[in-house]
Image (tube, helix red, strand yellow):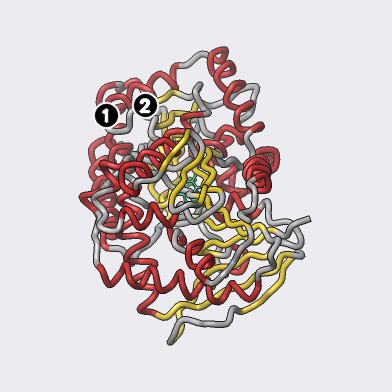
Amino acid sequence: MARLVIVSNRVPTLGRRAQAGGLAVALQSVASPGTLWFGWSGQTATKTATEPRIGEARGVSYATLDLSASDYGQFYVGFSNATLWPLFHFRTGLMRFSRDDYAGYLSVNRSFAEALMPLLRPDDLVWVHDYHLIPLGEELRRLGYKGRLGFFLHIPFVPPAVLQVLPPAAELVRMLCAYDLTGFHTSRFVQDFLASARDLAGAEVTENSVRLDGRETAVGAFPIGIDAAAFARTAVRALETGYIARVRESLQGRALIVSADRLDYSKGLPNRLEGFGRLLARFPQHHRKVSFLQIAARSREDVAEYQSLRRELDRMTGDLNGRFSHFDWVPLRYMTQMVQRPRLAGLFRMARIGLVTPLQDGMNLVAKEFVAAQDSEDPGVLVLSRFAGAAEQLRDALIVNPYDPDEIADAMHAALEMPLEERKRRHDSLREAVFQGTAAQFCASYLDAFEAVPLAA
Ligand code: ADQ
């Protein structure tokens, strides 16, 4: 059987701290013994390493590289998170482009390819993840690697009219065509990629392939999922813990509304807080009856936009609580730290509403975790942005346009008033989607398609 080689910017198990990030959560559950996982160590050093550090845990081999501080600045903070991330989330106004950062991005990808190449075998399945590493496949080909190379993008893809804002847009599309299989979360992203390949790079496209420079790339939608059964078990067990007992006591019978995200402008946090403010302003019957817990784990704090978002949220939470609190009721609880997964699962299970309202999101695993955690006999309600990839599968959530705070407020009100029968009907359908489209199923369907791609002669 072919060996699986996962390549991602962060290599989760070696990180000293757990991370609040979707890729790590989803892939950790599928790295089976024998897998090689390659990526950045999460550390900076005086210069970018050429030899990877090798480690092993539970049968999985890890090979990681340190980055120099200037590579970290240009590759990670710069081009990945201040150029590609906003662009791929339709925020061209936040996108900053610098040729130096782009050069750093290419050079780190070249260093990754050079360090990875000696570790590869001809029949490996090399599966590269996410926007940090788009050029890696082309670099490996340049070094003569002839085996299978696949890519999966965890964030949205944009239509050509948006992508073309990026000066090297055509180059990036060409790099995505250096793989044998390029995957996205949803059929919409597939269509936008095909249109970009055609319009910006002159590729020939069919509905599931692109041909550029004489090479064919298969293209498909592979919606990522979670280990739903495990998350559900964790949620049930969490109810017995002292932590959840304290949460329950603090609620004093009030309905819990919960949101958990990385503190990121793509997640629509200001709009959501405004939506909650509209709920309280327009539906005073919910005063003292609800408690909204927003957990927003600090993320990418060295990118300027994340610092200003944090200040904006500090201000908004203060305003909202100042406006609506009573001496014995504070409507919004706002935390900027990570919460351990078992605790998060328990909070989701207790919640009456899961509020997931990103402005754009590749998939959004929190939506799926919330569904998996619910008690099927008395389930809570998922309020979900139509711009989360998850909305393609979770159609029985209350789907909202997150740009309209009143629509968020209406959905919250509907969720709080919803009769048990309707909650159960919606939950049954959501549960089926989440338990069928798991992380394991995502990997199996990607890898099946990957192995079926004919090797170029
Ligand atoms: P993210 O943008 O990180 O992932 P998401 O899919 O929601 O978003 O995953 C976040 C993960 O971190 C979830 O498992 C969640 O439980 C956890 N998490 C979030 N906040 C937390 C907190 N405060 N404390 C502890 N844990 C927290 C990217 C893309 C997504 C895509 C995933 C997977 O942006 O669109 O779904 O990759 O492909």
**Element at badge 2?**
strand
Is residue 204 visible to us here?
yes
Instruction: Please give the name of the residue rendered at 42% of the width and 41% of the height, measured from the top-left corner.
Output: 204
Instruction: Give the mark count.
Output: 2
> As rendered, which of 93 and 420 lies closer to the eye?
93
Q: Quadrant of residue 6?
A: bottom right
Q: Position of residue 318 (x, y in %)?
A: 26, 47
Residue 184 is left or right of residue 145, and the answer is left
Q: Is residue 390 above or below residue 64?
A: above
Task: Measuring from the top left, give residue 52's x and y in whole percent.
Answer: 59, 78
Viewer-nearest residue: 230 or 457: 457
Which kind of residue does numbered mark 2 sit on? Val
Quadrant position of the N terminus in the picture: bottom right
- Reply above or below: 449 against 75: above
| Cα separation between marks 2 and 1 | 8 Å
According to the picture, the residue beneath numbered tag 2 turns out to be 400
Q: Is the CB of the residue bearing disc 2 within 8 angstroms of ligand 1?
A: no
Whether the residues at callouts 2 and 1 have beta carbons within 8 Å, the answer is yes
Depth order, front residue of 328/375: 375
Tell me the quadrant of the picture where the C terminus can be found: bottom right
Instruction: Identify which amino acid the numbered label 1 is placed on.
Output: Asp
Tell me, for residue 404, which label it has, or none: 1
Crowding at dot 1, Cα within 10 Å, few <14 / some 14-19 / many 20+, comes out as few
Residue count near mark 2 (Cα–Cα under 10 Å), binned few <14, some 14–19, many ≥20: many
Above or below, comparing residue 407 to residue 307 in the picture: above
In the rendered image, residue 256, in percent from the top left (x then y), is placed at 47, 34
SS under mark 1: loop
